[in-house]
Image (cartoon, rainbow, N blue to C red):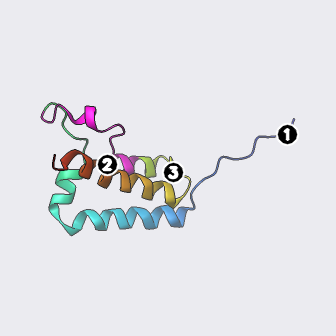
Amino acid sequence: SIPSPAAPKMAVEVKTEIEEILHEFMQLNPKIKKWFYDPVDTSEYIDYLDMIEVPMYLSLIQKRLRNNYYTNKHSVLADMELVKENCYKYNEDG
């Protein structure tokens, strides 16, 4: 039988570079890590999951990088954008 093709995988160099950028990003301002590293505490922000369909946070992105979840840099960037979009959506005035 014909073997299945290998699943797409991000190049090690790209993965390492993204991990370094993510680390540097969190060092820019202590508040970045404080606010965005862990999942939102839904016992404190009880309506968060009513407003945010797909929660995303930096430690999950790091875990996904370690576990080879991402197949390219664009999918990592999409999750980074989701962190920002969720923040704006939850905190918008009105």
**Amino acid type of the residue tagged 3 in the rendering:** Tyr
Find residue 22 and report its image quarter: bottom left
Q: Is residue 30 left or right of residue 19?
A: left
Residue 2 image label: 1
Q: Which residues are magenta?
A: 44-63
Secondary structure under tag 2 reads helix
Residue at point 21%, 56% (across, down): 33
Q: Position of residue 70 (x, y in %)?
A: 51, 51
Q: Of 17 and 57, which appears nearest the observer?
A: 57
The residue pinned by badge 3 equals 70
Q: CA distance from mark 3 to mark 1?
A: 26 Å
**Amino acid type of the residue tagged 1 in the rendering:** Ile
Residue at point 74%, 46% (across, down): 5
Q: Of 40 and 67, which appears nearest the observer?
A: 40
Residue at point 85%, 39% (across, down): 2
Residue 59 image label: 2
